[in-house]
Structure formats: structure tokens, C-alpha cells
Image (cartoon, rainbow, N blue to C red):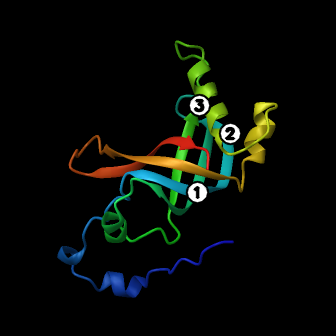
Amino acid sequence: MKTRIERPNFTDILGMHSDDIDRPKPLPTGTYSAVVQDIKEGIFEKSGTPVVEVVFGLTGVIDAVDEEALAAAGGLNGRTIRHTFWLDPTNRDGGHRAAWELKNFLDNCGVEPGIMGARVEAAVNAEVGIELVHVPDKRNTGNLYANYSRSVKL
């Protein structure tokens, strides 16, 4: 079931004074329930590194989420989180850690063991818990982003 997201009225936005526009607040840290909305396998153009990109649709709060901060960030209505698994076989461990992280994610999604490519495809629409952490912007450490840290079984 897709949640209808209210689209902004751009005429209203263009009529606003720029001093009245604040930076959106990040989602608070903690553990959320989510549905895997989309997964794409590909190659990152700049480096040639194989990647698996996952889009999570947040569906609820599980643990250690500040409800007031969540409300201040606009709630969960239609919110998504993206995460990229970098499957770099040239990494000093031969890509073993990245392969384990992807395997662990698929296990937490409840996907049956098997060939990894088939497991990735089977994870679409799976329900999983995801932990979000705050990561500072590299150029402006005063700006925080809510990023995927790990998955957990529901």
C-alpha cells in the first residue's frame, strides 16, 4: 500500500521570502520499522564499484526514537531512507565485510538462504527494522543527516 504524499504548491513556495525557509530537521536516531520499496543492482560510474541500492519506506517506530523530535521532523508520512551497499572486491578484505553486511540485511528481511542475486530480488516488499544514526555533513558539520546504520529482524 502506497501512502499518498501531499505535493507542495510551487506557486506558494516561490512567493515565500527566503528568510522564512528553514533547513528541514533530520529524522531522530533510533530504530524504525520499514518496508523494502525498491532494490537496484548496478555499478557506480566513477569507481566501477558494484553496488546494491535499497529504498526503505518507513512504517513505524520500534525503539529509542524521540517522539517530539520525530514530530518536529514532520513525522513518517511517506518518508524514505536510502542505503547503498558497496560490494568492492578490491577492498583489502576482498569485499568480504560488504558481502556479509548484505547477507545480514537479507537475513533480517527474512529472505531464504540461497544465491545472493536471487535473494536481493526477493527482498523487495520485505519488512525489516532499520537503525538510523546522525551523520554530520562533510562540508558543514552543523548539518546532520539521518543515515542507515544497520538492519534488525522484526
Q: Is residue 104 left or right of residue 75?
A: right
Q: Amino acid at mark 1?
A: Ala
At x 20%, y 49%, the residue is 142
Answer whether residue 72 is visible to the viewer in this image. yes
At x 31%, y 64%, the residue is 69
In the image, residue 47 above or below residue 4: above
Rounded to the nearest angstrom, the CA distance separating label 1 from label 3 is 18 Å
Q: Secondary structure at mark 2?
A: helix
Rounded to the nearest angstrom, the CA distance separating label 3 from label 2 is 9 Å
Task: State the residue in front, 67 or 137.
Answer: 67
Residue on which the image places disc 2: 106
Answer whether residue 87 is visible to the viewer in this image. no
Residue on which the image places disc 1: 34
Q: Amino acid at mark 2?
A: Leu
Q: Is residue 100 left or right of residue 72?
A: right
Residue 147 at what x, y percent from top left? Answer: 43, 47
Residue 144 at what x, y percent from top left? Answer: 29, 50
Q: Amino acid at mark 3?
A: Glu
Q: Secondary structure at mark 3?
A: helix
Rounded to the nearest angstrom, the CA distance separating label 1 from label 2 is 13 Å
In the image, residue 59 above or below residue 53: below
Q: Residue furthest left?
A: 19
Question: Which quadrant of the view contains residue 45?
Answer: top right
